[in-house]
Amino acid sequence: MIPPVPSRHRNAVATRQAILASARKHFARENYENVGLREIAGDAGVDPALVSRYFGSKEALFRETLRDDDEKDIMDGATRETLAQHFADLFLEKDDAPPGERDIHIERILILLHSIGSPKAGQIIRDAVQADILDPVSQELVGQDTEMRAAMALAVLMGMGIMHNMLSIDTLECTPEEDARFEKRLTRIFAAALEPMDD
């Protein structure tokens, strides 16, 4: 029996995802200006011309790296009551991703950290943070200073990401009892950032 020939659409989707995965890897490690399309294409196993064909430009590709593959926003079903635990879970990578798959939200944070000072990437980052993180989180909160509180929670998440991923300070290789205490403390920190102040 002759095996079915993969459809052109399926190949196009796979090529696009390979380019995007390669771009995320490079932008999570290097400043925007230091990443070249040829490097991205090389790691993806495609011709550099395909990067422009699928994404149009380096700026557009960078913008796509800040988005989720499945188009879930950072809230991912979290409510005001579960938001602190949800932020802790993002850091702890407690989701349904297959083992070994890098958490997309932490990877986005690394991309932000490496390129926030870039003249070209900086505005893309600011727009993405506002639209994809601060707006959804602040809209779920009530009371005063909702955007400030959302920004504080993001600052905690980014700080934890720096400590764990960039400085290689591991807080996750602990006993089950230590893990539970760590998660509880982290959730309390997020809650303190997100909750309104008692007047």
Image: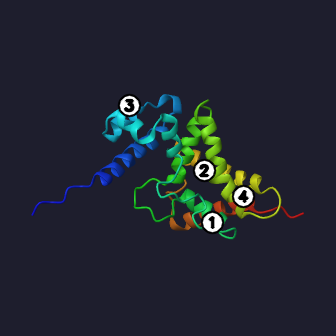
- Earlier in the chain: of badge 1 and badge 2, it is 1
Residue type for callout 2: Met
Please state which of the two labelled residues, at mark 2 or mark 3, is closer to the viewer.
3
Q: How far apart are labels 3 and 1 at the CA level?
A: 40 Å
Residue type for callout 4: Ser
Question: Which of the pair 184/141 is nearer the observer?
Answer: 141
Question: Which of the pair 41/191 is nearer the observer?
Answer: 41
Q: Quick one: SS at disc 1?
A: helix
Q: Quick one: SS at disc 2?
A: helix
- Earlier in the chain: of badge 4 and badge 3, it is 3
Q: How far apart are labels 4 and 3 at the CA level?
A: 39 Å
Dot 4 corresponds to which residue?
Answer: 138
Percent coordinates x, y for residue 12 in the rendering: 33, 49
Dot 2 corresponds to which residue?
Answer: 160
Query: Mark 2 near mark 4, Cβ–Cβ under 8 Å?
Result: no
Mark linked to residue 85 = 1
Q: How far apart are labels 2 and 3 at the CA level?
A: 32 Å
Please indicate whether residue 8 sits to the left or right of residue 89 in the image. Answer: left
Q: How far apart are labels 1 and 4 at the CA level?
A: 16 Å
Q: Quadrant of the N terminus?
A: bottom left
Query: Mark 3 near mark 1, Cβ–Cβ under 8 Å?
Result: no
Q: How far apart are labels 2 and 4 at the CA level?
A: 21 Å
- Earlier in the chain: of badge 1 and badge 4, it is 1
Residue type for callout 3: Arg
Dot 3 corresponds to which residue?
Answer: 38
Q: Residues within 10 Å of mark 4 (few under 14, many from 20)?
A: some
Residue type for callout 1: Gln
